Image: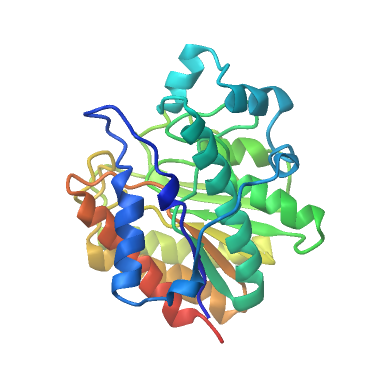
Amino acid sequence: MLNLWSSAQYAIELPDGHRFPMAKYALLRESVLREQLVSPDRLHDPQRVDVNDLLRVHTPEYVSHIVHGTLPPAEQRRIGLPWSEAFVERAFRVVQGTIEASDAALEHGVAMNLAGGTHHAFPDRGEGFCTFNDVAVAIRRLQALGKVRRVAVVDLDVHQGNGTHGCFTGDDSVYTFSMHGAKNFPFHKVPGTRDVELDDGTGDETYLALLQEHLPDVLRAARPDLVVYLSGADPHEGDRLGRLKLTFDGLMARDRYVIGTCRDVGIPVCATMSGGYGHDVHNTVAVHLNTVRVLRAFARG
């Protein structure tokens, strides 16, 4: 039984020419329903995250600045999205989507937030289109409730999850694994538990070989009760920001390998979208749609 969460209805208006592809969320939601990958009652609108859950990761000062729109202008620009009431609402709903999906993954084996993966958000700041770190908040909540002890974050966005690494520095209960472009944003990397840096132009064969080399070791070392999988679309060859050369088939093979390897040993998987900035937004949506197809194949019940 596959459950999905979508905060597409909370999309915010952006200035003309803004490079963030906000349209991808609604397009993905529409595609999932059109292809009947899940029934409408399995595609949920997330609630609004409880502030107390945000405070498991983020500082009170930062949360207050976001809520009231009082971040210094330079720090708001660092996030890359303009402040508005809708901006706050969306940020709260995106985090809750991953919280609800992580609960469902523990129950059903797999689930996905059709948003989230905001891995550049630190406890006291955001950057790179990331306001709150949904993955870190979801993990800390599950740990606090005693639902999991150990978690592995498998981050296959093209950009290193510097904020997620920062949230869990020094905590061996959360294993952070990232495969990302060596010369891509963020230019100051924060060490995770395991980082695999990729050359510009890396294609399917090399990428998949590295993934198959590292992921089994990650799972053995992490011994996780849950994997949170950031299934970024930006390694695709048509991405404006990715600089890698993975094909649609290569990315679908990536998803099958990650999800299949975890499920073969009984580890639940909560997936999030993370990044994707295709020259054609429909290519980005196609990558994420393939991830949903793979999850559906591994759903139980």
State the residue at coordinates (42%, 76%).
38
Asked whether 10 or 73 is in front, the reply is 10
Q: Nearer the viewer, residue 48 or 123?
A: 48
- Residue 216 placement (x, y as % from top left): 54, 68
* Observer able to see residue 119: no
The residue closer to the viewer here, 15 or 250, is 15
Can you tell which quarter of the image residue 31 is in?
bottom left
Question: Residue 260, image x and y in percent?
Answer: 48, 76
- In which quadrant will I find the C terminus? bottom right
Q: Quadrant of residue 37?
A: bottom left
* Identity of the residue drawn at 73% across and 27% down: 60
Name the residue: 43% across, 34% down.
129
Tell me if residue 17 can be seen. Answer: yes
On screen, 16 above or below 279? above
Q: Position of residue 148 (x, y in %)?
A: 75, 62
**Farthest-out residue, bottom:** 301
Residue located 44% across and 57% down the image: 114
